[in-house]
Image: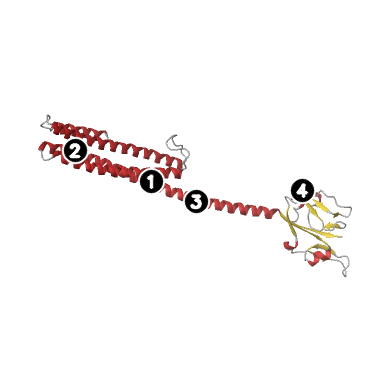
């Protein structure tokens, strides 16, 4: 940029030296007009350069946010999300692109005005050539700035696509996590689900929960759990939360015929190992360790 400014100053000096009639007011006015055109264009190009530099810093901040590197305080509004920051920068890119197009249009308009001022005089032609040199330099700067903006737009688009991919990946991860959590809860619930049933021997046999084995001629047979138990015949409970099991007939006594650890009960059996009214479980893990199915036969 400094070399451009030097070239612009040199062009002005050359144009001034080429004026063979410094005492002519018209020539002085033309010189001042040309100088004003250059100053206006230079100011516009400088503002655009500053704006583009600021955009580059903001884009760097967004990249830092994406990579979790700390950004400089004050680069952008702290309360904006990365997506909002990208949208803000993209809006600014569009704005500065419009300004560049307007600068190029003003540059062409300025040259036309200078052409009208210079006429056909040889000295004025030299001033026009010097001005054209400055115009060419400014056009090159504007084209460079336009390329920078195109590169920024590409980077913003890439960041947007990456953000969309991350958002999609996050949705899948959340879905997978939810599914795993559900499966885990289901497994835990299944592991802690136990079953019980209480009734007379005939009632339980009718439901194929128990069977009678041994004995002689139907005498002295022993009631034991059926080999294949149907869980739908039982009442399911969660061993972690259900610690009291109410027996169906309060006046009757029940005997446990499955492999539960009755020593883990808070309820004490009678001398014949029978229970009445309610079973209170003191240590559920120990009580249910032998079997998930509890069968109580009324005596």
Badge 2: residue crowd in 10 Å (few <14, some 14–19, many ≥20): many
Q: In the image shown, does 234 or 249 lie closer to the viewer?
A: 249
Q: In the image shown, does 136 or 239 lie closer to the viewer?
A: 136
Query: Is residue 96 among what the camera can see?
Result: yes
Residue depth check, mark 4 versus mark 3: number of the one nearer the observer: 3
In the rendered structure, find residue 155 and report the number of the disc placed on it.
Answer: 1
Q: In the image shown, does 99 or 76 lie closer to the viewer?
A: 99
**Dividing the picture into quarters, in which one does residue 137 lie?**
top left
Q: Are marks 2 and 1 in contact (CB under 8 Å)?
A: no
Q: CA distance from mark 2 to mark 4?
A: 98 Å
Disc 4 designates what residue? 283
Residue depth check, mark 3 versus mark 2: number of the one nearer the observer: 2
- Name the quarter where the C terminus is drawn: bottom right
Residue depth check, mark 1 versus mark 4: number of the one nearer the observer: 1
201 relative to 6 in the view: left or right: right
Disc 2 designates what residue? 131
In the rendered structure, find residue 169 and report the number of the disc placed on it.
Answer: 3
Q: Residue furthest front?
A: 25
Residue depth check, mark 2 versus mark 1: number of the one nearer the observer: 2
Query: Is residue 14 among what the camera can see?
Result: no
Secondary element at image label 2 = helix
């Amino acid at each position: 940029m400094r070399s451009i400014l030097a070239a612009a100053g040199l062009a002005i000096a050359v144009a001034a030296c080429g004026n063979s009639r410094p005492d002519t007011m018209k020539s002085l006015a033309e010189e001042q007009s040309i100088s004003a055109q250059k100053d206006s264009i230079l100011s516009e190009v400088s503002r655009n350069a500053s704006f583009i530099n600021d955009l580059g810093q903001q884009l760097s901040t967004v990249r830092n946010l994406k990579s979790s590197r700390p950004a400089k305080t004050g680069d952008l509004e702290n309360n904006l999300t990365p997506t909002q920051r990208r949208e803000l920068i993209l809006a600014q890119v569009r704005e500065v692109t419009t300004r560049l197009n307007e600068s190029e249009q003003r540059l062409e308009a300025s040259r036309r005005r200078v052409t009208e001022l210079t006429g056909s005089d040889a000295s004025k032609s030299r001033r026009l050539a010097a001005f054209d040199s400055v115009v060419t330099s400014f056009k090159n700067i504007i084209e460079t700035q336009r390329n920078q903006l195109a590169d920024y737009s590409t980077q913003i688009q890439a960041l947007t696509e990456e953000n969309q991919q991350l958002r999609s990946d996050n949705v899948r991860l959340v879905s997978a996590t939810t599914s795993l959590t559900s499966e885990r809860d289901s497994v835990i619930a299944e592991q802690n689900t136990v079953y019980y049933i209480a009734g007379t021997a005939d009632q339980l046999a009718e439901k194929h929960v128990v069977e009678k084995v041994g004995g002689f001629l139907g005498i002295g047979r022993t009631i034991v759990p059926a080999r294949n138990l149907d869980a739908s015949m039982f009442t399911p409970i969660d061993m972690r939360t259900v610690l009291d099991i109410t027996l169906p007939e309060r006046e009757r006594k029940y005997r446990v015929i499955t492999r539960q650890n009755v020593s883990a009960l808070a309820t004490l059996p009678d001398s014949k190992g029978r229970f009445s009214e309610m079973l209170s479980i003191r240590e559920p893990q120990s009580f249910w360790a032998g079997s998930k199915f509890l069968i109580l036969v009324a005596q």
